[in-house]
Image: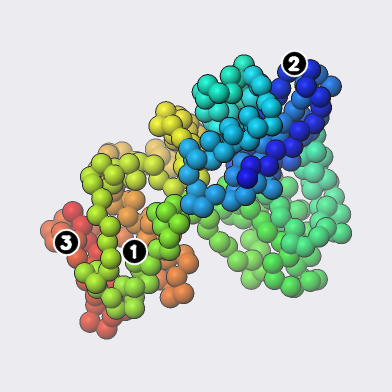
Amino acid sequence: MVFLEQRGDFAGLDVVMVHGLPSAPDSMWHVGDALVDVARVTNVSLPNYGKSDPLRPYDARGALELVEEALIDAGVRRPILLGFSAGVYRAFELALRPALEARAVIALSGLHDMSAAHRESLRGARTDPRGFIEGRGRPFVIDEIQRGGEALVLAVKSAVDRDQRPGSFVLTGSSRFLTVPTLSESLSGRARIIDLWPFSQGELRGTRDQFLDRLVAGDEPGDMAWSPISRREAAVMVLAGGFPAVHSMSSDRSRRQWLSDYARTLVTRDLTDLSRIHRAADLPGLLETFVVAELMKQASWSDTPLRLAHYRDSEQPSHVPRRSPDGSALSMLWE
């Protein structure tokens, strides 16, 4: 079931709002409420978000079909689609479905920067960081905490020292925000760092990846059940990666555009680091990188502490895992 919330009366104009990832569906209403006097506004909670039912396993095409059916059942006619952030892609994909007869798509990619509520929260975090976090419920989630500056991190540190119950704060960011040059406080001894990886192949298929755990337990690859895939399937798997936004898109064109935009952003942001790469040979093979990333994801949730190291030896290629005599080390070499 896809949850829709409608406000305003239909007077010949329907407006449909599609939120981004991982934005909460309700975050769109500070725009939608400004339109209810001239249109019927429908806010969509995408499957797996808000009050909509989860879709397991997640299927982008199936999710859009459910949204389309819900909008038609709700009487939405020839809507204008408003998309925020990654929701822009979903809005375009919905507009391509003839049954909706969409009039237009409007992209609101920078909406969070325009939000008065967000600006006020940031101002409060910077001018009165202690007051900003006092009296809040726990756990208190602060996204992009580095934008609040050193004073906000110190306020969190002070609060944790006064109340040492674990899980009081969840600090998130798109980078290792506690290591940025503008912050000197690292919260060492007070915080646990959890790397949020893109989806693993098992997560995308609704299964648990156990390859590393079984190797550590002594199982041999020949004893494991394998599902053969074609070279084309392997190529699609590698190129698609595991970003949630990519796998929620139903068209190859949308996926290519998203990945292209993402790469362009990284190049602009990390130009200094990328300038150190002089030759294409300096980069590991794409398939090799994909395999290593999948192993790192599995290592992150394994009960056995695992440390991965990368070593290339073109003289001894092999696809067979090798175990050290004492069983403490495994090596997997490939061409």
The C terminus is located in which quarter?
bottom left
Q: Amino acid at mark 1?
A: Ala
Between the residue at mark 3 and the residue at mark 1, the CA separation in whole angstroms equals: 17 Å
Q: Nearer the viewer, residue 285 or 252?
A: 252
SS class, disc 3: loop
Residue 45 pos. (x, y %): 66, 41
Q: Is residue 262 left or right of residue 120?
A: left
Q: Amino acid at mark 3?
A: Ser
Q: Which residue is mark 1?
A: 309
Residue 217 pos. (x, y %): 34, 78
Viewer-nearest of labels 2 and 1? Answer: 2
Assess whether mark 3 and mark 2 are in contact (beta carbons under 8 angstroms): no
Q: Which residue is mark 3?
A: 318
SS class, disc 2: loop
The residue that appears at 73% across and 65% down in the rendered structure is: 168
Q: Nearer the viewer, residue 22 or 155?
A: 22
* Above or below 330: residue 155: above
Q: Nearer the viewer, residue 244 or 192?
A: 244
* Above or below 159: residue 280: above
Outermost residue toward the bottom in this view: 326
Q: Which residue is mark 2?
A: 12
Q: Amino acid at mark 2?
A: Gly
Q: Nearer the viewer, residue 137 or 282?
A: 137
Q: Quadrant of residue 117?
A: top right
- Residue 148: mark in rendering: none
Between the residue at mark 2 and the residue at mark 1, the CA separation in whole angstroms equals: 62 Å
Residue 96 pos. (x, y %): 51, 23
